[in-house]
Amino acid sequence: MTEDTIFAVASGAGRAPIAVMRLSGAQSGPALASFCLGRLPPPRVASLRRLRNASGETLDQALVLWFPGPATETGEDSAELHVHGGRAVIEAVSDVLIAAGLRPAEPGEFTRRAFLNGRLDLVQAEAVHDLVFAETTAQRRQALRQMEGELGALYHGWSDRLRSVLAHQEALIDFPDEDLPPEVEAELLAAMRDVRAGIAAHLDDAGRGEKLREGLFFAITGAPNVGKSSLINALAGRDVAIVSAIPGTTRDALETRVVLGGVPVTLVDTAGLRETADILEAEGVRRALARAEEADMVIEVVEAGEPARQTAHGSADRLVVANKCDLGGSAQVGTLPVSALTGEGLTALRERLAQAATALTASAGPPPLTRARHRAALRDALDRLTAAERADLPELRAEDLRLAMRALGRITGQVGVEDILDTLFREFCIGK
């Protein structure tokens, strides 16, 4: 498939003033020349051209760009056509490209070719996907740091150090009778422990990068009729949940997506927590408790003047909100007074939730882990290094070092990634 020349509209679906069509592959130049009466524009210079079909009919007046490889995004000859965004124009240009032997690109195929041609490693390719789907400033910044190679550089650095350690270990195996300095063995073990400590510290991040990439879950819990549904409506700025004075109105978890502190957060309104003989409501209570256990933060709502229930919520952070403070009840110490009806205290609540979201996803130093795939490979590398330190025989230590390097290589795409490429790039947009 990489021998084919591909094309796609890269500017998204729907009508637009301008549509950008991308080409990549060996036939990009001839195809572009056929549009422009046999004349390619100067490389990397936007040129205004009339696009014509084989019979000489003008299809559109467009800006065209010619990018000869290998110094291109995909590593191949590439081109761009900035045409008017009408459906008829795009279809006419596509028909000419297909007639010239080009084919429509598969999802993520441009980025996949960039990876296969060495323009990106796999960590950077994943960051391209994250950048396209970033909803917030914090997500954009995290994806950009990863796409610019910071995370990959960290993993490559560990691999390079292990490669040096393995070389010394092989020397100890191959030349057992040589009087190698005793400090060689000590330096080898020290370097191995240093890499292992770095990986362990990288893993011990409370999942901050993954939480920022995927978003947080905040569960709103409390007894019936304390105003949970009113509160989620107020925080979302729209009617998410039905508000009623009848206890047990909310029986299933209702979700809405908001942005707090630059972090996407899913607020979950849950059923009122109480003992009930109603089978449906009891199931809602069970689900509410389950969501609270899974949440990154629990917002426990009580009526002003009433104590919190002190319900166990696993390891989640907990904030007690005293609702209905407009009715005159005094909030207990340690609770945040609000009124979902009048809006009193909602600004302070949003600020507190934004601080919590930022704290749950903030990271200093190198870019954090962003995918479960990375975490699994790093744990494998950590296990191999631990085994290498405990190995009784130098040959076993060398094998464990090789396996640790392979685990790191799976993250960046150096080894053993063929089985995940189709799954990874299938999630991309067409044209990217």
Image: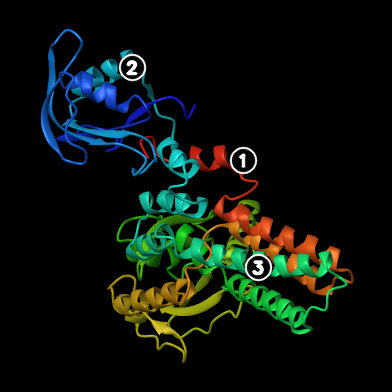
Q: Nearer the viewer, residue 161 or 297?
A: 161
Q: Position of residue 334 (x, y in %)?
A: 47, 89
Pick the residue in front: 189 or 9.
Answer: 189
The three-letter amino acid code for the residue at tag 2 is: Ile
Question: Which sits in the foreground, 392 or 413?
Answer: 392
Considering the numbered disc 2 on the image, is that residue within a helix, a strand or a loop? Answer: helix
Q: Is residue 299 above or below residue 38?
A: below
Which quadrant of the structure image shows residue 91? top left
Q: Where is residue 177 shown, x and y percent of the image?
A: 88, 72
Residue 98, disc: 2
Query: In the image shown, does 423 or 47 lie closer to the viewer?
Result: 47
Whether 98 is drawn above or below 405: the answer is above
Within-10-Å neighbours for mark 1: few <14, some 14–19, many 20+:
few
Q: Amino acid at mark 1?
A: Glu
Q: CA distance from mark 1 to mark 2?
A: 29 Å
When asked about the image quadrant of residue 84, the answer is top left
Q: Is residue 96 left or right of residue 116?
A: left
Relative to residue 310, is residue 229 depicted above or below? Answer: above
From where the camera sits, is residue 81 visible? Answer: yes
Q: Amino acid at mark 3?
A: Ser
Q: CA distance from mark 3 to mark 1?
A: 26 Å
